[in-house]
Image: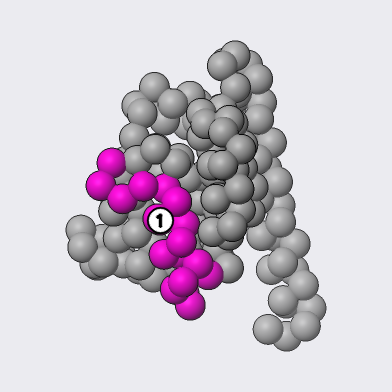
Amino acid sequence: MAKSILIVEDNRQDEMLILRALKRTDLDCTLDVVRDGQQALDYLLCEGEFGGRAQTLPSVVFLDLSLPRVGGLEVLARLRANPLTHLLPVCVLTSSDEERDRQKAYANGANSYVCKPLDFHAFAEMIARMGQHWLAAQAATMDLDEENGL
């Protein structure tokens, strides 16, 4: 299974920072970006403009909460309700430090909730660590599946 990260981010500046941070780590993975919640759902479920895409899931989704068309919490709830995506790792990556947003995200099945640091270096380091963590977790799961004949 190919390793990939889906970034769901409508802010172009944050998108560029995320991409730059992940590329600096030399992660062996594909980085895909969508810019609103509907695009994220279409990408992951191979619908709409992504109807012809091969039905493969990314290793992890970095999901912003404040998105146009379909908000991040709604995206998360719909992913958890779908048998194809209900176990997909989703990391909420947002500027909101509101406790109610954090609680809603975890209640809707977020695997983690991370506030975007204002300092670029802290932001870049956090993104790099998140990418490394989730790609390593996928590799470990794949190794276990192979050992168990799955």
Which quadrant: the C terminus? Answer: bottom right
User: Tag 1: Cα neighbours inside 10 Å, few (<14), some, or many (≥20)?
Assistant: many
Asked if one can make out residue 150 in the rendered structure from this viewpoint, the answer is: yes
**Relative vertical location of residue 9 with respect to residue 39 in this rendering, above or below:** above
Which quadrant: the N terminus? Answer: bottom right
Residue sitting at 61 percent across and 38 percent down?
Answer: 99
Provide residue 102's location: percent of width, then percent of height: 59, 43
Provide residue 134's location: percent of width, then percent of height: 66, 50
On the image, which quarter does residue 49 sit in?
Answer: bottom left
On the image, which quarter does residue 111 sit in?
Answer: bottom right
Provide residue 60's location: percent of width, then percent of height: 55, 53
Say whether residue 136 is magenta: no
Residue where numbered disc 1 is placed? 75
10 left or right of 130 in image: left
Residue sitting at 54 percent across and 42 percent down?
Answer: 101
Say whether residue 71 is magenta: yes
Residue farthest toward the bottom in the current orientation of the protein: 149
**Relative vertical location of residue 11 with respect to residue 32 in this rendering, above or below:** above
Q: Amino acid at mark 1?
A: Val
- In the image, 48 versus 64, the foreground residue is 64
User: What stretch of residues is rendered in magenta?
Assistant: 68-86
- In the image, 38 versus 134, the foreground residue is 38
Residue farthest toward the left in the current orientation of the protein: 49
Residue sitting at 58 percent across and 68 percent down?
Answer: 87
Residue sitting at 36 percent across and 28 percent down?
Answer: 11
Provide residue 82's location: percent of width, then percent of height: 44, 73
118 left or right of 53 in image: right
Asked if one can make out residue 59 in the rendered structure from this viewpoint, the answer is: no
On the image, which quarter does residue 26 sit in?
Answer: top right
**Relative vertical location of residue 142 with respect to residue 74 in this rendering, above or below:** below
Q: Is disc 1 placed on a helix, strand or loop? A: helix
133 left or right of 110 in image: right
